Image (cartoon, rainbow, N blue to C red):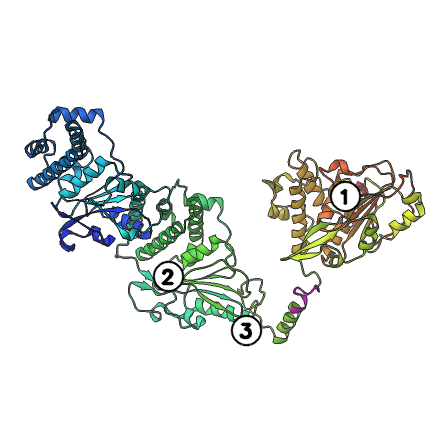
Amino acid sequence: MLKRLQLQRFEDFLKPLKERPQPGVYFCRIAGYNPEVQSFLEKVLGSRKQNPLLVTGKLPNPDENQLSYFREMLGTDFSLDPGFFDQALRKWLPRLDQVQRETMIRSLCQTMLDLRAAGKTDNMLKNAYIKFMCWMYYRFEQILHKMGKEPLPKILYDGVLSAHELQMFCVLSDAGCDIALLEPQGDASYLKLDPESKHSNLFPGAGNGAFPPDFSLQTVAREAEQKQKIVGMCQTSEGNVPLNSTNTWLTGDLTKDSLKPPAQRGSEKNCFYNMFVRIRGVEEKSSYVKELFLWKKHLEEKGRKVLVLESLPIPTAEEVARAGRCNVQTAQQVVVGLLPALRPTANARLDGIIRSAFSNLILELAKENEPVNRIKNRAVYLVCWFNRYFDQLLKGIKEDSIPVFLYFNVCKTAFEALFLRFLARLPVDVLEIYPEDIPCCLEDRVLFDRNYPESLHIEKFPVSMDDAGFTTVAYHAEQELTETLYQDSGMYRTRQYHKASALPLKTMYEEIAILWDQEATFRPGFEVVDDTVLVPVITAKVCGVKNGDVGEYWSGVRKLLGENTLLISSCPHWNGAGVDRSFQPVSLIKNKRLERQKIKDSPGYAYSLLREETQELILDKIQKLLDSGLIKGTFSQGMEYKILAVTLHLDQDIIRMIQRFDFTKKNPKVVVINTRDTICSLEDSIVLAFLHLVGFDVVLFVPTGYQIIEKYYTGPLFTEHQIGDYLYDMQVPAMSSGMTAPREGIFSRFFRRSSS
């Protein structure tokens, strides 16, 4: 029998007998988990072709069919005698040679003697003998005839040992077999069977880390098999995949470095030399754009492929479909399922690099404990983006030319960052360049960072000499002065901001006149958050006449009618007559979201003359009105289409007020007076709610106290002020404002349009 050795290092487990400290076998226990344990298991499982290996969990008791066959072959006799065991083993396990059989007989006899010494009856010994024989035949026969021979068989066991299982493994160990017991529940159960660890040794190198909650050898075996499959898919006919030597050759002059051909970067044949660089800020503002354009031009003159992107649009449904769908439970399955979807280059060496980089990066995510579904989603994005930009970046490239991928932006999502990290593991120079210092989520151990103190705002990457202008030092000094004056100082440039969010003010009636003419910056609640202005707005309904004093009442109304104020002197006012009858809003809303580009491309779109930021503001507030559900019937009775039709056909005066609106100055205003027994139209309710969201001050004067607009809303929009007695049939005196809104019908609108 071979001696049992103490395992000191995991790698010794796979060594042949002649390379071990002395001839012997390992029978070890692994009660902790760490990356070394994971690696050890993967290596053992990956060595199946070289070493006979059996992976098992709990050994089930022999079933009736197995017992019946055993009795048929060997009968029911039992004797604790070497001759009896010899005869039984010759018949039951004929592939054992004489040395193996003799070793096993000695071990079986010793086991039975130990059981008898422990007080077990002969009947118990017989039952143990039958169980051992059935296990050897049905569970271990495939490796028994290899016991004690090179390469030594291996057994990996996962579970809590029973006494009989321990005795069985002792027999197998004596016969010449390496055994590793995995103990996810810890070592305490084993020590109850073998308190002094006489039969096996606890391996100290496993540490005290807990096993993964879902650990099983079967799972590890499947993953190891998948990894072997991945290795096979990544191999090339030329041998090992070349290694990337990223940034190791840089001198620090990044412009000159980027222009170097591969031969001047390094000479190792099994390596490729690329760069992975992030540059934020600018060194010299006046010449930055010109130098950026000329640098790209020099690269192209050297025959280099250069792909410049300013964004990474998410994959389309068609791109995702082409990547293929696969049901996966592990990161390895994600890799195996998606590797074939990567477009081939017709260069076996490059294909191997691409597949290897993809595999390694996805498996890294698994080590970071990312959920499998998230790993799959990111992998699909990689495949889609790689295939989308394949022609521009890699198609037809030569080995003496390194393509360049330039991302003129910063990575704002983990998907973008992963794509740049993927490309940086290929023979591609990857640069993320942005002239402003803004947050970026790109991180990588080999990423080279270069930061400059100056910032410069550029709308897009210069693609021609027309873009590559030269700006003077004085111009940039003026820009810096502007930034200093208007950055968190309470001072604001004209139309400095393009986004606004209305902040309704809850006020007393008397405060309306006080706040009415104030700029937004002086109103309570004003704030700028990121690039969005919180605009305090007045949204009020004034009911009744204070002290019944009609003259004072109209005087108070007149005080509100200044510049940039729309006066509506009776209701209903808007009736939808201005809506183009050919307008079809149904196709312009999908999944409760505006189809913005379709709206802008539609024949009846009337706002195309407006500045882009004004168009976006209008569409933002239409979407906000839809999302709020303020108008009854929205997304339940088709009201969303009515809202879209009305808000896309506003009067010219209102549109001009919106375009003139500077969110840090005075709010545009609407004053509505209704003294009659009439109510607002549905269109009135939509327009007033929309203007409120844009940032207009809106006040309704209703001396009758009637509910003239509430029936259209799902909740209160206006803060109601009850100021005095209700009066009826009051005559509205002549009033004027910055822009009194005349009542318009179909004919007036028609003739106004036809004369323009």
First to last magenta residue range: 484-491
Mark 2 and mark 1 lie on one chain; the one further toward the N terminus is 2
Q: Three-letter amino acid code at disc 2? A: Pro
**Residue 102 highlighted magenta (yes or no):** no
Name the residue nearer the viewer: 358 or 577. 358
Residue closest to the eye, 375 or 145: 145
Percent coordinates x, y for residue 691 in the rendering: 73, 48
Residues 521 and 626: in front is 521
Q: Secondary structure at mark 1?
A: loop
Residue kind at label 1, given as amino acid type: Phe
Camera-near label (2 vs 1) is 1
Secondary structure mostly taken by the magenta-highlighted segment of the chain: loop
Mark 3 and mark 1: Cα distance apart in space: 54 Å
Question: Rounded to the nearest whole Å, what is the CA distance between mark 2 and mark 1?
Answer: 63 Å
Q: CA distance from mark 3 to mark 2?
A: 30 Å
Asked whether the beta carbons under mark 3 and mark 2 sit within 8 Å of each other, the answer is no
Q: Is residue 212 left or right of residue 682?
A: left
Residue 289, quarter of picture: bottom right
Instruction: State left or right for residue 608 relative to residue 144.
Output: right
Of the 4 image quadrants, the one containing the N terminus is: top left
Q: Which residue is mark 2?
A: 427
Return the x and y of residue 569 as percentages of the image width and height: 85, 45
Of mark 3 and mark 1, the one earlier in the sequence is 3
Q: Which residue is mark 3?
A: 284
Q: Nearer the viewer, mark 3 or mark 1?
A: 1
Label 2 element class: loop
Residue 678 location in percent, x, y? 84, 36
Q: Which residue is mark 1?
A: 718
Residue 470 visible in the snapshot: yes
